Image (cartoon, rainbow, N blue to C red):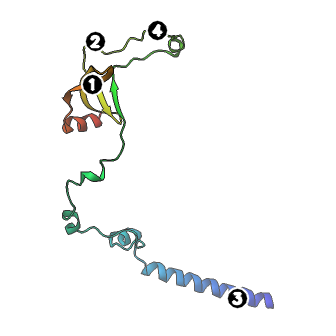
Amino acid sequence: MVDEEQDDISADDWAAALAEQQSAASDAVPPAEEAAAGRAGGVFQELKPETLSGAVPNKIEMILDIPVTLTVELGRTRIAIRNLLQLAQGSVVELDALAGEPMDVLVNGCLIAQGEVVVVNDKFGIRLTDIITPEERVRGLSK
């Protein structure tokens, strides 16, 4: 008899909990609408047109200290691992670039300029002869 009363109580409790959950779900705003309304947990604020137009252009100072990798590429080649393992001091590796041809200057792997080798105070350098325009760089990204 005690077990039947507990079953009735637990069944009533479950029914009440399910009814409460269904009413809460019907009153809730869908997550997409909630995020669009700016109520996504108070984490993000809604972007307003005046906020976007009020942004300060030319704030390049924010990125001036970010390090990048500058690479000057003489040329490239593909060789088999067998040939790579046979390389020794004095070996010559043929590259795809011709003598006197401009070398590529890359920043983080992206071509930004071409130039020629110069020697200044016993150190190698590169004199830039052609700067790649932003439009050409964007076209290169899509390849």
Question: Looking at numbered disc 3 in the image, what kind of residue is underneath it?
Answer: Asp
Q: Earlier in the sequence, mark 1 or mark 3?
A: 3
Q: Earlier in the sequence, mark 3 or mark 4?
A: 3
Alpha-carbon neighbours of circle 3 within 10 Å: few (<14), some, or many (≥20)?
few
Question: Mark 3 or 2, which is nearer the eye?
Answer: 2
- What separation in Å lies between label 3 and label 4 (alpha carbons)? 89 Å
Across and down, in percent, residue 13 comes to 64, 86
For the point 35% across and 71% down, which residue is it? 33
Question: Looking at numbered disc 1 in the image, what kind of residue is underneath it?
Answer: Ile
Q: Quadrant of residue 103?
A: top left
Q: Which mark is residue 91?
A: 4
Question: Looking at numbered disc 2 in the image, what kind of residue is underneath it?
Answer: Ala
Q: Mark 1 and 4 residues: CB-CB less than 8 Å, in contact?
A: no
Q: Nearer the viewer, residue 7 or 113?
A: 113
For the point 50% across and 80% down, which residue is it? 22
Q: Quadrant of residue 111?
A: top left
Alpha-carbon neighbours of circle 4 within 10 Å: few (<14), some, or many (≥20)?
few
Q: Which mark is residue 118?
A: none
- What separation in Å lies between label 4 and label 2 (alpha carbons)? 18 Å
Q: Earlier in the sequence, mark 4 or mark 2?
A: 4
Name the residue carrying label 1.
Answer: 126
**SS for dot 3:** helix
Name the residue carrying label 2.
Answer: 99
Across and down, in percent, residue 69 comes to 37, 36
